[in-house]
Amino acid sequence: MPNSLFVQTVPSFLRWCAVSFCLSVLAAGCGHPLPALPGFDSATWRSDAYGCQSKRVTMLPILEKHRNELYGARVNDITRLLGHPDEEELGEQSDKVYIYYVMAGIQCAPGHPRATQGRVLLRSGATGTITEVILPVVKP
């Protein structure tokens, strides 16, 4: 009796592993790689945490120009380009919103209180790809 139980569970375990592996491969293939954004200085963007040095604001026109390329990009590629977000929000059904401040504001005070203006919002869906890009309107 124990041998027959083992024989029946091993094939179902292997089937489960095969299906899990296939789904993982498919999920990893979602989205598209983020192409280079000519004129965008990733190092400068990353060094301006919370936008407190207002260096990021000068790169908004480049992000606006390449906005369509950001849609569908993988979150890992966005993080490589822009660095870890200044803030992150969890939305409904495993959506995430990545927030990057672009100019000095109240978020530069000790404790980094939240600001509602001057920030880039990137929403990702359950597949880990960017589904929404919101750029601030900044007047020179």
Image: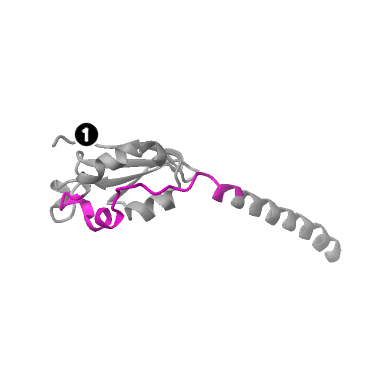
Residue 50 percent coordinates (x, y): 21, 52
Horizontal side of residue 36 vs 126, given as left or right: left
Point 22% across, 48% down: residue? 56
Please check the rendered image and state whether residue 37 is part of the magenta-colored stretch, yes or no: yes
Majority secondary structure in the magenta region: loop
Quarter of the image where one finds residue 12: bottom right
Going by the numbered disc 1, the residue's amino acid type is Val
Please check the rendered image and state whether residue 31 is part of the magenta-colored stretch, yes or no: yes
What is the image's colouring? one colour
Which residue of the protein is positioned furthest toward the front in this rendering? 38
Residue 15 percent coordinates (x, y): 74, 53
Q: Residues within 10 Å of mark 1 (few under 14, many from 20)?
A: few
Nearer to me, 1 or 75: 75
Horizontal side of residue 138 vs 20, given as left or right: left
- The image quadrant where one finds the C terminus is top left
Horizontal side of residue 21 vs 94, given as left or right: right
Bounds of the magenta span?
26-55
Residue 62 percent coordinates (x, y): 29, 42
Residue 27 percent coordinates (x, y): 56, 48
Point 24% across, 45% down: residue? 59
- The image quadrant where one finds the N terminus is bottom right
Point 31% across, 51% down: residue? 85
Point 45% across, 47% down: residue? 74
Q: Is residue 102 visible?
A: no
Horizontal side of residue 116 vs 3, given as left or right: left
Of helix, strand and loop, which one carries label 1? loop
- How many numbered discs, if any? 1
Q: Which residue is mark 1?
A: 137
Quarter of the image where one finds residue 70: top left
Q: Is residue 118 visible?
A: yes
